[in-house]
Amino acid sequence: MSTTLLSPTLSFKPRLPPAKPQCFLRPPRLVTLSSPKELSRISLLKRFAVNDYDGAGSGSGFVDWEKAEKEARARSTMPERFRYLAKEAPDPPVRWPWLLVLGFLIYAWRAVLFELSNWKNAVFGIVRFAGNLLTYLFAILYRFIGSPITFSIRCLEDSFYTVRAFYSWTINNAPIPELTTVIVLASIVLAIAEATVPNCINKQPYVLTVSGLIGYAAVRGYISEPFFWTLLLGLYAFSKLIKKRDNVSCAMPVAAVLAAVGETWVRVLVLITFIALATYQYSQTLSEGKQVEDQEMTERRIPVPLLVAALAIGLRLAAKWAGYRHLTWMIV
């Protein structure tokens, strides 16, 4: 039996409650706002869900942070006019990650440019090959038809410059009195021939055109005088021997040219001779008992040389009038 001086009722050992199952409840979370930084963080997150169901509350599990922020600001002792100063300014945006992206883009664009340069070289190579092939084919083609093409181009160029020179000469230097005399004398010869042999002008329009060109070339000095007489003799022989025409029809183109571009005594001699020839042929026709019948003509064609001479006179007069009017307006 042990003896002790202490009271048996006193004990320094903690009394533990009897072991039984207990349910530990999590204390409710209180939202405390102590700094403006927390306020700014709360303002960014308006509402979010937390697993804070303690079995005694509503069980919704949502905290209205915007309402809590308003309540915290309402309990603040800071005057209302200074409360906007408590808001923390947002941090400057971080831009250094864009440097990595920029470097990657530069590298990728360099690769794209390299690939595009390869495609460009390939396309240029194909175009260059096609150009060389077409050049070779054109050289082969020009080897056979180059001379005719060149000759045709030169003929067109010469014709263009000839027409241009003729037009310039007509506008600037066309002799109106001389051209009027040419038209009158040639018309007299043609009228005598038409009265003797009806419809003789319409039967040989090309011969009259050629005779007019011969006379123009002789006046401008393009052909010599002996060659001029040779050509006129050839026209008469062509009409007499090949076309088998009468004397008046054969001599009409030659007489019209000589009466138009010859000297004064040549003109008088040609008119007298042609009138005598027409009178003799008409009398021979009447003595043989043939009647000269007037043939109905549906269309009277003006000889091209006379038409060109009349056009030259009109252009010259129009150019003089236009120049006079232009100078008049300049003076006024």
Image: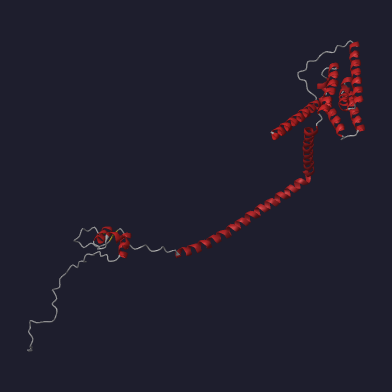
From the viewer's perspective, tell me whether residue 129 is left or right of residue 1: right
Compared with 326, 268 (above or below) is above
Give the colour scheme of this rendering: secondary structure
From the viewer's perspective, tell me whether residue 289 is left or right of residue 142: right
Which corner quadrant of the image does residue 116 belong to? Answer: bottom right
- Which residue shows up at 75% across the image and 48% down it? 139
> In this orientation, does residue 206 appear?
no
Looking at the picture, how far across and down is residue 43, in whole percent?
A: 31, 60
Compared with 142, 26 (above or below) is below
Which corner quadrant of the image does residue 242 belong to? Answer: top right
Image quarter where the C terminus lies is: top right
From the viewer's perspective, tell me whether residue 270 is left or right of residue 26: right
Image quarter where the N terminus lies is: bottom left
Looking at the picture, how far across and down is residue 217, in whole percent?
A: 85, 32
> In this orientation, does residue 161 appear?
yes
Looking at the picture, how far across and down is residue 153, in whole percent?
A: 77, 41
Which corner quadrant of the image does residue 38 belong to? Answer: bottom left
Looking at the picture, how far across and down is residue 181, in whole percent?
A: 84, 25
Residue at the far front in the pictured view: 332
Could you say which is closer to the camera, residue 34 or residue 144? 34
- Which residue shows up at 91% across the image and 20% down it? 272
Could you say which is closer to the camera, residue 185 or residue 42? 185
Could you say which is closer to the camera, residue 221 or residue 158? 221
Total marks shown come to 0
